[in-house]
Amino acid sequence: MSRAFSTPKLLDAARAKGSSLRPSPIALLIGLAALSRILIFEVAALAFRFLPHAWVQSVPGYLVPAAGYWSQSLLGVWAHWDGYWYLSIATLGYTGRSIATAFFPLYPMLVHLLGSTALSGIFVSLLCFAGGAWLLFLLARRELGQEAAWYSVLSLIFFPSSFFFNAVYPEALVLLLSVASLYLVSLRRYTWAALVAGIASAASVNGLLLGLPILISLWQERRPWREWASLALVPLGLLAYMAYLDARFGNPLTFQSVQAHWGRSFALPWVTLWQAIRDFAQHLSQLDWGHLFAAGEPLVGMSNVWNLIFAVLGIALLVLAIRRLRPALWSYAVAVLLIPLFYPSTGVPLMSSPRFLLSAWPIFLAAGVLMAERPRWSRPALWVSIAIGALFVALFATAHWVA
């Protein structure tokens, strides 16, 4: 190669022309998101092939894909635990199963439209994840600047429990809708923000919590009172679901009344935390890494160890978020994290803490700010996150309890 066309000179020419050869942010973001998903799929496949499996928890009236057929099994990996409930709702609806009403309808409706299969559930999740990650980048860039925006997205997509964005779970859908709503709030398009929140409230109770940042923004911006009427749109999805439950089961709050079946009941947050600390100490002393992947019945109690660790991490990031973010952002994270503290699960008070942190996504904006300020911490933090994530993926793929 002649010196006139050497690589350094080509790069210098590209920089001189405004770095026109540099990939666009959306291309980089898609590449990173795709890399994280491919890594997760590969770890799950290897774990499914080589590690002992726990018993798959089936759903009444719904046939779990046969373990002997590799394509069904590798897809079925992504519907373990709650995933099979969502698939059963997509296939059979709620008829005759009031306990299924704890799972909100929007996500299984979308899965139903695409065939009510594990593959369609994965497709819906990945599509929503891609949109949610892009909107999160746009919002973070608007609020925090380019560098912190990249770190925010990286901290989310490589977070240990981010594999749920691959799974037949509504986390990716809730991410997309909640980020979209608060992005619209940042643009002062309150009616559209409330409408998106109304749609989100049919996917998760977290959608209803989006009304809080909308209200705060309306107050801080001193918007005309006529714009406050948009708040009436926030509970529309939930109200539609309640109307259906009233017609089907005679109780519009069926989704709430069945929580006792799932072991959840009201408690004060400090009571929940104290019980979580006690259970953490008990199970930490009993933790046997060699039996985490034991065949047979899944060991749910052992998750008390990482549940508390992730809850403390979430609280620490929340404190940082309160110091660095606008109230319209951190207030939503506070509300999301308070719900499981008020409604602990029997025997596992902070059940699903790693997964619930995904819905409190403003904490990842705070993580992005911290990593941008201390870039030397970013690489070790991401590597640790990826390593823990690989462990979680392996547990989930083999039907052991994670979150």
Image (cartoon, rainbow, N blue to C red):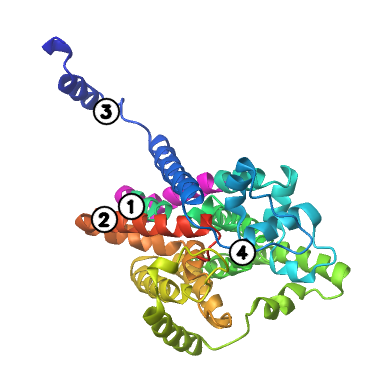
Disc nearer the start of the sequence (2/4): 4
CA gap, disc 4 to disc 1? 25 Å
Residue pointed to by mark 1 = 151
Question: Local crowd at mark 1 within 10 Å, few (<14), some, or many (≥20)?
Answer: many
For label 3, the residue is 18
Q: Tell me which numbered mark, 1 or 3, is placed earlier along the sequence.
A: 3
Measured Cα–Cα span from mark 4 to mark 3: 42 Å
Name the residue carrying label 4. Answer: 207
**53 or 38, which is in the foreground?**
53
Give the amino acid type for the residue marked by disc 4 in the picture: Gly
Residue 122 screen position, x and y as percent: 60, 46
Q: Nearer the viewer, mark 4 or mark 3?
A: 4
Specify the amino acid type for callout 1: Tyr
Compared to residue 33, the image places residue 269 above or below, namely below
| Distance Cα–Cα, label 1 vs label 3 | 24 Å
The span from disc 1 to disc 2 (Cα, nearest Å) is 8 Å
Q: Position of residue 256 (x, y in %)?
A: 71, 76
* Amino acid under disc 2: Ser
The numbered mark, 4 or 3, whose residue comes first in the sequence reads 3
Q: Nearer the viewer, mark 1 or mark 2?
A: 2
> Cα distance, mark 2 to mark 3?
28 Å
Mark 2 or mark 4, whichever is nearer to me: 2
Lower position in the chain sequence, tag 1 or tag 2 = 1
Pointers 4 and 1 in contact (C-beta within 8 Å): no
Q: Magenta stretch?
A: 128-149
Could you say which quadrant of the image residue 267 lies in? bottom right
Question: Callout 1: helix, strand or loop?
Answer: helix
The image shows residue 348, relative to residue 25, as above or below, that is: below
Label 4: state its secondary structure: helix
Q: Nearer the viewer, residue 35 or 290?
A: 290
**Tags 1 and 2 in contact by the CB under 8 Å rule?**
yes
| 11 in relation to 183, above or below | above
